[in-house]
Image (cartoon, rainbow, N blue to C red):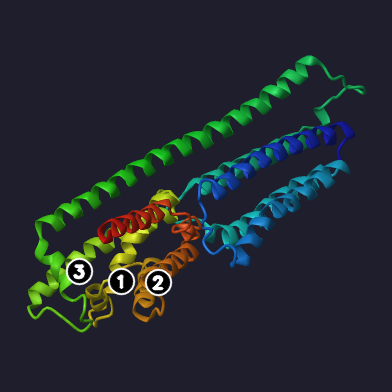
């Protein structure tokens, strides 16, 4: 046991650590829900992800609470033992449950947790020094709350908030700039593909038009078939990047919708269906998530029993569900351009009849 005044000082140190921990916890959840550090696709179905995100702050509180209880009862040495044990227990929870959810290319949460761990080590060091020098610590019987003390405390809190705010804003600004560059690169590559199509109309004809009415048609020349396959792969590579960028929230939902309609047009193409379902195993060249999206589009086109428009809407719903991108589910809702087009055609038809 230590004197009451030493226990009071240890409680103040632990309380300051709690405040800083709360700030780091806010940063972590900001990165989760705003910075997209954790993939939340299918989160409505994945109860495990929701449970881990809820359990994380509870586990932090449980890890820090025993040290407070020990310090309140003047057992500072016990607080020195249980606080590192709580940090180790939370580290086990982090590496076993939370860390696997974080995207492999995103290190922001890892950096935040490392800084958090450094603050925990600094807190343990301060408590250890306080315990070792407890005989030399003197506190007046009636401590007074002065303006100087308030100013110092406020400056510490403001500094901590400033560091956290600067870290988050600089991280977000860097992330935003990189996203903008990636998006511009993707759009420029799509323009290059359009130019390639204009320069090679024979490939466009073979893929999009020659086999439009014959599912079993294949170009007889192996070289021609290879060129058509590579042309399709150019589009698939762009689509894969667009899908991945949407998963990482580089592409806005409304912009990604314009890519989904392009993806559907390819999946609905009979020539592409022959390539995708052939024994060449073209799907194995792509990651599983994107492969499943394309396979779903081909399946809907081949086995769909609705009209072409209904099949297209079903594909959009499938992509919205798979990528947790709910805006494109309503892509065809409220289309004034379609209503105007129908009205315009009706007027032209009426004028011709008249």
Rendered position, 162 above or below 103: above
Mark 1 near mark 3, Cβ–Cβ under 8 Å? no
Q: Position of residue 285 (x, y in %)?
A: 28, 70
Query: 230 and 128: which one is in front?
Result: 230
Q: Horizontally, is 281 left or right of 340 in the view?
A: left
Q: Which mark is residue 268?
A: 1
Mark 1 near mark 2, Cβ–Cβ under 8 Å? yes
Q: Position of residue 345 (x, y in %)?
A: 32, 57
Neighbour tally class for label 3: few under 14, some 14-19, many 20 plus, Cα within 10 Å: some
Q: Position of residue 52 (x, y in %)?
A: 64, 60
The residue sitting at 26% across, 78% down in the picture is: 281
The residue sitting at 69% across, 57% down in the picture is: 55
Quadrant, the C terminus: bottom left
| Residue 278 picture quarter | bottom left
| Residue 17 picture quarter | top right
Q: CA distance from mark 1 to mark 3?
A: 10 Å
Q: Across the whole image, how many numbered discs are drawn on residues?
A: 3
For disc 2, the marked residue is: 311
For disc 3, the marked residue is: 208
Q: Horizontally, is 182 left or right of 215 in the view?
A: right
The residue sitting at 37% across, 66% down in the picture is: 290
Q: Horizontally, is 26 left or right of 69 in the view?
A: left
Q: Earlier in the sequence, mark 1 or mark 2?
A: 1
Q: Position of residue 210 (x, y in %)?
A: 15, 74
Is residue 101 in view from this perspective? yes
| Residue 120 picture quarter | top right
Query: 17 and 197: which one is in front?
Result: 197
Q: CA distance from mark 3 to mark 2?
A: 19 Å
Q: Earlier in the sequence, mark 3 or mark 2?
A: 3
Query: 303 and 180: which one is in front?
Result: 303
């Amino acid at each position: 046991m230590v004197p009451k005044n030493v226990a009071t000082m240890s409680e103040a140190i632990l309380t300051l650590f709690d405040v800083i921990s709360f700030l780091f916890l806010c940063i972590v959840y900001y990165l989760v829900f705003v910075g997209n550090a954790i993939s939340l696709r299918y989160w409505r179905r994945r109860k495990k992800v929701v449970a881990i995100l809820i359990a994380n702050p509870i586990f932090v509180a449980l890890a820090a609470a025993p040290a407070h209880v020990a310090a309140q009862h003047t057992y500072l040495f016990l607080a020195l033992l249980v606080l590192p044990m709580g940090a180790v227990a939370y580290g086990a929870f982090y590496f076993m449950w939370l860390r696997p959810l974080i995207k492999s290319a995103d290190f922001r949460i890892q950096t935040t947790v490392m800084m958090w761990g450094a603050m925990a080590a600094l807190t343990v060091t301060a408590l250890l020094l306080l315990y070792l020098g407890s005989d030399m610590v003197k506190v007046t019987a009636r401590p007074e709350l002065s303006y100087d003390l308030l100013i110092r405390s406020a400056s510490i809190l403001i500094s901590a908030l400033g560091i956290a705010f600067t870290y988050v804003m600089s991280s977000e600004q860097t992330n935003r700039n990189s996203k903008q560059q990636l998006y511009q690169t993707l759009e420029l590559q799509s323009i290059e593909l359009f130019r390639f199509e204009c320069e090679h109309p024979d490939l466009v004809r073979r893929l999009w038009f020659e086999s439009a009415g014959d599912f079993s048609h294949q170009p007889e020349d192996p070289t021609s078939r290879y060129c058509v396959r590579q042309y399709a792969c150019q589009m698939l590579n762009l689509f894969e990047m667009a899908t991945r960028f949407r998963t990482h929230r580089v592409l806005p939902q409304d912009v990604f919708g314009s890519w989904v309609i392009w993806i559907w047009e390819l999946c609905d193409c009979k020539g592409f269906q022959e390539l995708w379902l052939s024994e060449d195993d073209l799907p194995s060249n792509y990651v599983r998530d994107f492969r499943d999206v394309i396979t779903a589009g081909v399946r809907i086109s081949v086995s769909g029993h609705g009209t072409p428009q209904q099949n297209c809407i079903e594909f959009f719903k499938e992509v919205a569900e798979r990528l947790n991108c709910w805006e494109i589910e309503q892509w065809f809702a409220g289309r004034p351009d379609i209503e105007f087009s129908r009205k315009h055609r009706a007027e032209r038809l009426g004028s011709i009849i008249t």
